[in-house]
Amino acid sequence: MHERTGLAAVIGPGRRRSIDQRLDARAFDLLSLTMACVLGVHAGHLPWWLTAALAIVLAVRWWQRRRHGARSPLLLKLPLIGLLAVAVVFSYGTIFGREPGSALAVGLLVLKLLESETPRDARVGVSFACFGLMAALLFDQGLVATLVVALGLLPALATLRALEPAQPATALPQALVPGLTLLLAAVPLALLAFALVPRLSSPLWGAPNPAESRTGLSERMSPGNFTDLLTDDRPAMRVTFDAPPPAPEQRYFRAYVMWLYDGRSWEHAQWREADGRARPAETVEAATSASYRIDLEPSDRTVLPALDVPLDAPADARLSPDREVFADQPVREPLHYAMRSAVRYRLQAQLPQTARSLALRLPRGFNPRTQALAAQWRARYGQDDPAIVRAALALFHDGGFRYTLAPAPLGRDAVDDFLFGTREGFCEHYASSFTVLMRAAGIPARVVTGYQGGYWNALGDYLLVRQSDAHAWSEVWLDGRGWVRVDPTAAVRPERVSLGAAAAAGNQLGWAQSGWLAGLRNRWDVVNHWWTEGVIGFDALRQRGLLTSFGIQETGTATLGLLLAVGTALFVALGVGWALWRHERPEPLRQALRRLEAKLGRCGVTRRRSEGPQHYLRRAARALPAQRSELELLMKRYLELRYASDEPSPELLRRFQRAVREFRPRRVVK
């Protein structure tokens, strides 16, 4: 009781008002850093010009406050708020929704810095910043994004600590250490809550993520539109096989089969017979099959890539007549499905007339030189269709063609320009021109798009297929063999099939996709995969099976609540035990005061039982007038260390201990 009576006297009403009314430079710097972190974690999904504008506002405000210490005028803040709202509406068309709402929130947070002049303003800003950091997880919940958001809390915690009175100025890394300690101490309780707090069957905010195409594969293909996809290094899917994986030349994953050609683009056909009934699936005679499981990344499309050719469809999906697999709903969340495919097969031994006609159809008036070349082959080889296929592949192999991701543009007669002019391109160009050549020669042919290759991750025991593994190839129908896969790209660049897309492109995909760094990146994918499976994929269904290994088949809400209560009680008990253990230890500040009392006691100034430190040290100062200034300074420092903050500053504590050791009292003069 008596120790607390001196706090108001030491700080004084004037100093207390100044603390409440003015934010010191150190706290303002940390507050600015906190808001910069929020802007940084949201920069990836904000318009670049908005990010740049907010960064400029933040930097100018920090410079203006540090150099001049003046407040921002009201006439500046109001127009900026209006401009922010106009910018969000101009960019998104509304202020409602995930993207515009986040942009508006981040903008308002940065503008809050213009009026942050008191500790109260700073605390409000820090609270808003923590909400902004959490909102970043609505866009990306990956391991790196989660760690970045967690580390973004460190400046916020350092700002709150800097707002405590009597905090000495420290270097920035040292100021972040207490916050890091708090985060590490919170990890066990966070893990307990993650595992045991009952999961909802749908997001709390009730709004699904907006459509966002992430694969690039579509129902339409034009030579050249795979360029962005082939340079996209994000994972598309991960494939786990029940047996040893197939050889690289068999790792073709079927997505779309394209029949329709307009002279420029190929398009997927929705097959229906004349009477309106769906065409039956093409028959497959499987010589060798493989069972596997696919973890597909979100694509916002219904197509489910499958190893060529799938024998059946998973649950909530259907098998098309062309052996494509389509889900009932677009894939907007990571999807796991099991498949069985024929690796060695004969597909569609008999070709119906309707399919044959469509597989030979070419638009009139396009690519006359290609038509003439195909006619020459037909005249030379007669009815030997395999010989015509070999002639086309020999043309690509020996005709001076070059594999490149930056081909020259093509004109109206795109195939003529490619075959007899530029002779450079990638899989789209070769698959398209080869299929046109086959149709012009009277051989039924179609284009298939999907993925080919992938990186076998021995550490994770799965095949990693990236977006850059997107591929296009052809299928030709031959008598007695059915549909036969032909990859003309392999005739030009065999490494595309045997070694993968990165090997075929050479240094065209950039330094990050080759050499040891590519291997490191692929191994890092194992960590991301584990995070996706164990954290992001931990849904209500997996939570109900949490205790299966302990003989409990389904963990209900009551069981989860009981375990959560027990676990929380255990953590509270540990916390109380830790606090009591710390309380029982000799406190350094109290030890220093007792050492000072012992020195004064030897001089005849003994502390009374009901006397507080402030009254005692004031009486000692009166009894030792020659050392009054030293004792008053010691009293002031002690009261600040005891009452100005929850935890005394280590530096100030060391100064007080040193001052007590150096204090040499002289005996009281009677």
Image (cartoon, rainbow, N blue to C red):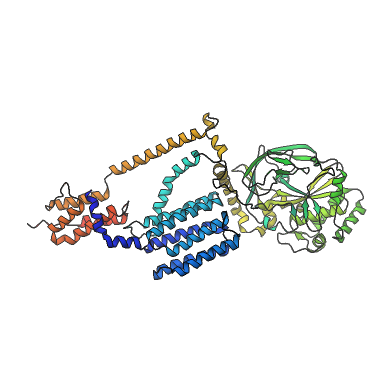
In front here: 584 or 524?
584
In front here: 203 or 602?
203
In front here: 359 or 275?
275
Judge from the rendering whether residue 547 lies leftward or rightward of residue 28; answer left or right. right
Q: In x, y percent, where is residue 432?
A: 79, 55
Q: In x, y percent, where is residue 375?
A: 90, 56
On-image quarter of the C terminus: bottom left
Residue at 54%, 37% (x, y): give it.
543
Q: Quadrant of residue 241?
A: top right
Judge from the rendering whether residue 245 lies leftward or rightward of residue 59; answer left or right. right
Q: In x, y percent, where is residue 214?
A: 65, 52
Asked if residue 543 can be seen in this view, the reply is yes
Q: Is residue 184 above or below residue 77?
A: above
- Report the number of numbered marks: 0
Asked if residue 247 can be seen in this view, the reply is no
Q: In x, y percent, where is residue 306?
A: 71, 43
Residue at 77%, 52% (x, y): give it.
267
Q: Residue furthest left?
A: 670
Q: Is residue 236 above or below residue 243?
A: below
Q: Residue furthest bottom?
A: 68
Q: Residue furthest top?
A: 551
Judge from the rendering whether residue 230 lies leftward or rightward of residue 552; answer left or right. right
Residue at 57%, 49% (x, y): give it.
524
